[in-house]
Amino acid sequence: MKIDYQETTSDLLKRIDIHNKFGGRDIDTWMLDIIKLKKGDVILDVGCGAGKQCFSYYRHLDGQAKITGGDVSEELLNQARLENKKIKDAITFIPLNFNQPFNLPDNTFDFESCCFAIYYAEDIPFTIREMHRVLKPGGRLFSSGPMPSNKQLFYDVIREATGKTIPPMPGSSRYSSQILDSMRNTFSQVDVHIFENPLTFDTAEPFIEYTRASLSEDRKLWTSFFKDKSEFEDIMLKIQAVAETRIKAEGKLVMTKVVGGFLATK
Ligand SMILES: C[S@@+](CC[C@H](N)C(=O)[O-])C[C@H]1O[C@@H](n2cnc3c(N)ncnc32)[C@H](O)[C@@H]1O
């Protein structure tokens, strides 16, 4: 499946910021508890974006690991490289398109992650086989992505505002089905962990900001929703009105992120 999507730096950083400010739980802490990294590990983060996970591993291991992050977006890699300067380029950031064979040798990494990215792959079994190939025997892959009940409120508000049912996302809607199956077919063992994080908004504004930072991706896919810019702005006004009405009635908006963490062993 061809998925024509590349995250923009500002949208990704905006959503990360909103998770940090309005979320009740920290996903990096949850993930670090599960993956149990060891000092000296050789680590690859696939679809590293601006380097969120790479920097988290670096801090957690006091810099005592060999960490590489790879992404197809030069813009996000440059953002990561800027941050990397603060730690004297301790992490290596490389161009990596997971739709092509990775330019990395077999049996190299102790641990690999792919956070909120695998569902953009055109051929999921191919990408998972590449991730498996570069892991050492006994090495582990952790992937994260949305479960079917993820951010229900977001979809409910848009449905109420537009009167339309949102089509399933061609990427992330496969996460707990096709992608999990493919990992199970390729790896010797896969454990499933669930993370729930309620984001609580007392005003509509941050919810609307989050919606905008999500919809620039979704707009490309929901062509029946957004034909042109003025239609998009009309819909945003309707979404804002629904959000404000709900806050008046209930005092707040709670959007729960429901994330699956799949830990696979080679
Ligand atoms: C939602 S972002 C997640 C980034 C990062 N892992 C994080 O959690 O902050 C999805 C990432 O997948 C990357 N991506 C999309 N298609 C890709 C491809 N073909 N190869 C490698 N990375 C890709 C995007 O550039 C983006 O950085």
Image (cartoon, rainbow, N blue to C red):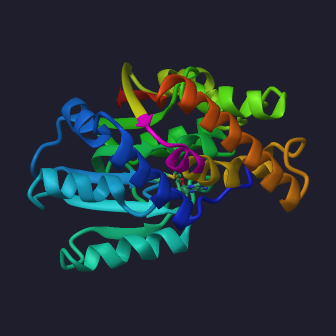
The quadrant of the image that shows the N terminus is: top right
Q: Is residue 1 in sight in this rendering?
A: no
Name, please, the residue furthest toward the front: 248
Q: Is residue 224 left or right of residue 71?
A: right
- Counting from the top left corner in percent of width and height, residue 247 is at 54, 32
The quadrant of the image that shows the C terminus is: top left
Q: Is residue 90 left or right of residue 96?
A: left
- Counting from the top left corner in percent of width and height, residue 83 is at 30, 73
Q: How many marks?
A: 0
Q: Nearer the viewer, residue 96 or 209?
A: 209
Residue 58 located within the stretch drawn in magenta: no
Q: Residue at x 15, y 56 (%)?
A: 59
Residue 204 located within the stretch drawn in magenta: yes
Q: Residue at x 48, y 21 (%)?
A: 184
What residue span does the magenta drawing correspond to? 200-208
For residue 242, above or below residue 152 = below
For residue 242, above or below residue 3 = above
Q: Is residue 23 in sight in this rendering?
A: yes
- Counting from the top left corner in percent of width and height, residue 137 is at 29, 36
Q: Quadrant of residue 204?
A: top right
For residue 154, above or below residue 120 = above
- Counting from the top left corner in percent of width and height, residue 33 is at 19, 32
For residue 41, above or below residue 183 = below
Q: Residue at x 21, y 77 (%)?
A: 86
Q: Nearer the viewer, residue 250 or 171?
A: 250
Q: Is residue 234 left or right of residue 60?
A: right
